[in-house]
Image: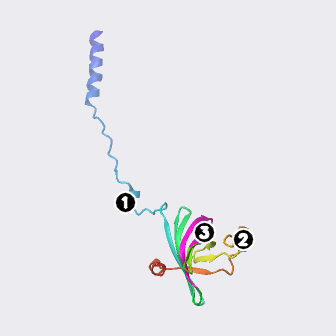
Amino acid sequence: MKKIILLASLSIFLQNCNKKTEVPTPVSTSDKAATSSVADTLGAKSFCYIGVMRKDTIYITIDDNLGTITGKMAIKNNEKDSNKGDLTGIKSGDTLKLTYDFVAEGTTGNKNDIYFLQTKEGLIEGIGERDAATGTKYANEAKIKYQGGRNLKTADCNIVAKALK
């Protein structure tokens, strides 16, 4: 009986030794997404606009970094003093709620709230009643109208950058 058990154990052992060990097939480490063009959805987006009203021109650059807006604006007036300054604010839906900190008539520190509706074609300036106490802020954001405001069209950023110098 011992011989039968010994022979059975030996045959099982030999069968297992003859089996080929399976090596897993190497998986390609190249990622298809890494080789294809990946759109940067998290970086700042830059936009440039120009608006012409009669003989006056307005230039705007906007950098949208996940809803935080920074930029520059210059208004070149034909018969009045022009102004130039920085834009800061937020994007709420399709509305840019900005503060314009500008230099006009040689004075610095002038601030004015300015809202724009952002469309595929460009920007439409919001028109609304100003707060009597400050004169720089809107009295009621809900009553701002985007009909009749200045219309700005998307533009080549190189042209806008030259005008903002």
Q: Residues within 10 Å of mark 3 (few under 14, many from 20)?
A: many
- Residue 160 appears left or right of 93: left
Query: Going 49% across and 64% down the picture, which residue do you hit?
Result: 44
**SS category of the residue bearing label 1:** helix
Query: What residue did someone put label 3 on?
Result: 98
Part of the protein shown in magenta: 81-101
Badge nearest the viewer, 2 or 1: 2
Question: Counting residues from the N terminus, which is met first, the one under dot 2 or under dot 3?
Answer: 3
Query: What residue did someone put label 1 on?
Result: 35
Q: Are marks 2 and 1 in contact (CB under 8 Å)?
A: no
Three-letter amino acid code of the residue under disc 2 = Asp
Three-letter amino acid code of the residue under disc 3 = Leu
**SS category of the residue bearing label 3:** strand
Three-letter amino acid code of the residue under disc 1 = Thr
Q: How is the image coloured?
A: rainbow
Q: Residues within 10 Å of mark 2 (few under 14, many from 20)?
A: few
Q: Nearer the viewer, residue 28 or 82?
A: 82
User: Which x, y percent locates residue 115?
Assistant: 63, 72
Query: What residue did someone put label 2 on?
Result: 131
**SS category of the residue bearing label 2:** loop
Q: Is residue 85 magenta?
A: yes
Measure how far apart labels 1 and 3 are at the Cα level. 39 Å
